[in-house]
Image (tube, rainbow, N blue to C red):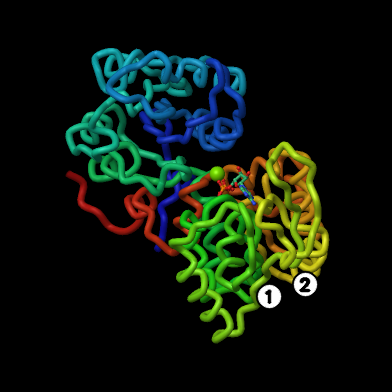
Amino acid sequence: MAIPDIRDVPVAGKRVLVRVDFNVPMQAGKIRDDTRIRAALPTIKDLVDRGAAVILMSHLGRPKSGPDPEFSLARVAERLQQLLGQDVQLAADVVGQAAQAAAKALQPGHVLMLENVRFEPGEEKNNPALARDLASLAGIYVNDAFGAAHRAHASTAGIADYLPSYAGQLMMTEIEALGRLLDGPGRPFVAILGGAKVSDKIAVISHLIERVDALLLGGGMANTFLLATGVEIGQSLAEEDFVAEARQILIRARATGVEIGLPVDVVVSVSLDEPALTTRVDDVDPSEAIYDIGPGTVAGYSEIIAKSKTLFWNGPMGVFERPAFAAGTLGVARAVAESNAYSVVGGGDSVAAIVQSGLAGEISHISTGGGASLEFIEGKELPGIAALAGERKLR
Ligand code: ADP
Ligand code: MG
């Protein structure tokens, strides 16, 4: 699947509409983390430097119906202006008169941002009329919003029916990095999966089990697998409805020779606020819950990680937000950072954990897409990528 790259196209004097993922976490009207804005800078700077008039569009949060100041991109436009070191004009609407006039007047080398695309009800419905209105603002469309590529929305997919469409640099980097995991990865290929819910991860596990040499499990998700092996897990988070599926995956792994890592020791407590205790996994009291993997498990996983050539990690090994239950996640982060493998970390909380550990610089690729990177690894076609690939007749 060849993806056309905007770097190959002359853009001087042209209006280029770029879908970015500026859906940053906000707290009390402030940007809590601007990683997503920084990630789009290479594409924006390149277009500006090459003399394009750059129009940006993004969603932010989930506005319920129409324009809502709480979900305005004003703060994001301000931050982008600081990071770029040049003016960023914010249009008062998405495709209304204000946006149209501003787009028309936009000079080469200048940057305009549309208001939150989700202020338009047609966005999430992938409404063709909205896609056409968006397209009318520019002559070229660029999608650099990998984090929104798993959604078939007007600004991520529909618009490609109306304009010549290309991938931005972040999109290209993500596709190459994640693609490397699915396409002839160096072996052994080891996946480390954790996080809260097995129901969120079962699809990715089912897909990976056919591709990896070892699958190391941790976090709340591992509890359902422990249940499937008949271990007492007390008050631990688990999903009874997925025990049968977990058992099938274990059987499949045995049949195909895939090594499965399950915790041999765990950190338990009667509640998150009570003292933590490390115990053997077959010694969990019915009154306790498992909140982290233990040091023995970290040591075992670290050995497997050290021998790997390709690593994919999604989902913390425990409730890493609490220092008492963060050692498992930190230990695995250290092992991944120390390995010489090609390593990819994806998922909102997993990335937060790796950043918190100060080891982000030792990872080959940190994916900016949470849901999008998981769906990519599941082998699904992402609508935002499919819309860029292949021949299409413009409407
Ligand atoms: P990601 O965002 O990286 O995909 P998830 O959202 O699936 O990861 O999981 C992250 C959450 O899982 C964290 O908030 C963490 O506290 C929680 N978690 C991890 N281990 C456990 C556990 N043993 N019990 C309860 N929650 C857990
Ligand atoms: Mg999460």
- Packing grade of label 2 (10 A; few <14, some 14-19, many >=20) is some
Picture residue at 46% right of the left edge, 22% below the top: 111
SS label for mark 2: loop
The answer to whether residue 228 is visible is yes
Residue 102, percent from left and from top? 33, 15
Q: Do the CB atoms of the residues marked 1 and 2 lie less than 8 Å apart?
A: yes
Q: Is residue 9 above or below residue 317?
A: above
Residue 304, percent from left and from top? 75, 71
Picture residue at 71% right of the left edge, 52% below the top: 292
Q: Is mark 2 within 8 Å of ligand 1?
A: no
- Mark 1 vs 2, N-terminal side: 1
Q: Nearer the viewer, residue 273 or 64?
A: 273
Picture residue at 24% right of the left edge, 38% below the top: 125
Quarter, ligand 2 = top right
Residue 150, percent from left and from top? 39, 49
The answer to whether residue 344 is visible is no
Q: Which mark is residue 64?
A: none
Position of 271 compared to 81: left or right? right
When asked about the image quadrant of residue 191, the answer is bottom right
Q: Nearer the viewer, residue 140 or 12?
A: 140
Q: Which mark is residue 307?
A: 2
Circle 2: residue type = Lys
Q: Which residue is mark 1?
A: 188
